[in-house]
Amino acid sequence: MAQKVRKQRRKRHNRSGMAVIACVVCIFCIVLIYNSVQLKNKLTEAQASVNQLQVQIDEQTELKTALEEKQNYMNSEEYYKELAREKLGLAGSNDIVFKKNRE
């Protein structure tokens, strides 16, 4: 009979130990799931930020290209001829000049 009581105590002790372990495992799983969700949110925000920055990089690259093209044009002979025609009223050697009759 004493042996039977000991077995019952062990079973109860084992059950309570298993319940404690199960609770610890459940809490651990909940913490892991919570952290996983938080990390996914941060990752999503970081990806959105990266996408926004990439758009800005593309825009700045296009602007840089346009400015380089404008700089090259402004350093060309064609630009200086055009500037002389517009600002100074000069004509090139191949240009036809029409004069108004003064009467």
Image: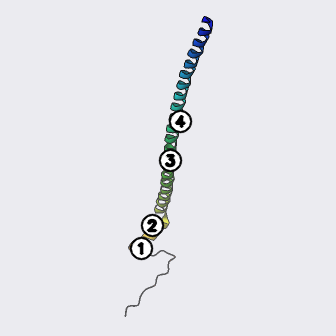
Q: Label 3's element? A: helix
The residue that appears at 53% across and 24% down in the rendered structure is 24
Q: Earlier in the sequence, mark 4 or mark 3?
A: 4
Q: CA distance from mark 1 to mark 3?
A: 48 Å
Taking depth in this image into account, of 65 and 14 the one nearest to the observer is: 14
The residue that appears at 51% across and 56% down in the rendered structure is 62
Q: CA distance from mark 4 to mark 3?
A: 18 Å
| Amino acid at circle 4 | Ser
Q: Are marks 4 and 3 in contact (CB under 8 Å)?
A: no
Q: Quadrant of residue 11?
A: top right
Q: Nearer the viewer, mark 4 or mark 2?
A: 4
| Amino acid at circle 3 | Ala
Answer above or below: position of 15 versus 75.
above
Q: Nearer the viewer, mark 4 or mark 3?
A: 4
The residue that mark 4 highlights is 36
The residue that appears at 53% across and 21% down in the rendered structure is 20
Q: Are marks 2 and 3 in contact (CB under 8 Å)?
A: no
Structural crowding at the residue carrying mark 3, measured as other residues with C-alpha within 10 Å and reported as few (<14), some (14–19) or many (≥20): few
Q: Position of residue 68 (x, y in %)?
A: 49, 57
Q: Earlier in the sequence, mark 1 or mark 3?
A: 3
The residue that mark 2 highlights is 80
| Amino acid at circle 2 | Tyr
Q: Position of residue 28 (x, y in %)?
A: 53, 28
Q: CA distance from mark 4 to mark 2?
A: 64 Å
- The disc placed on residue 48 is 3
Q: Nearer the viewer, mark 2 or mark 3?
A: 3
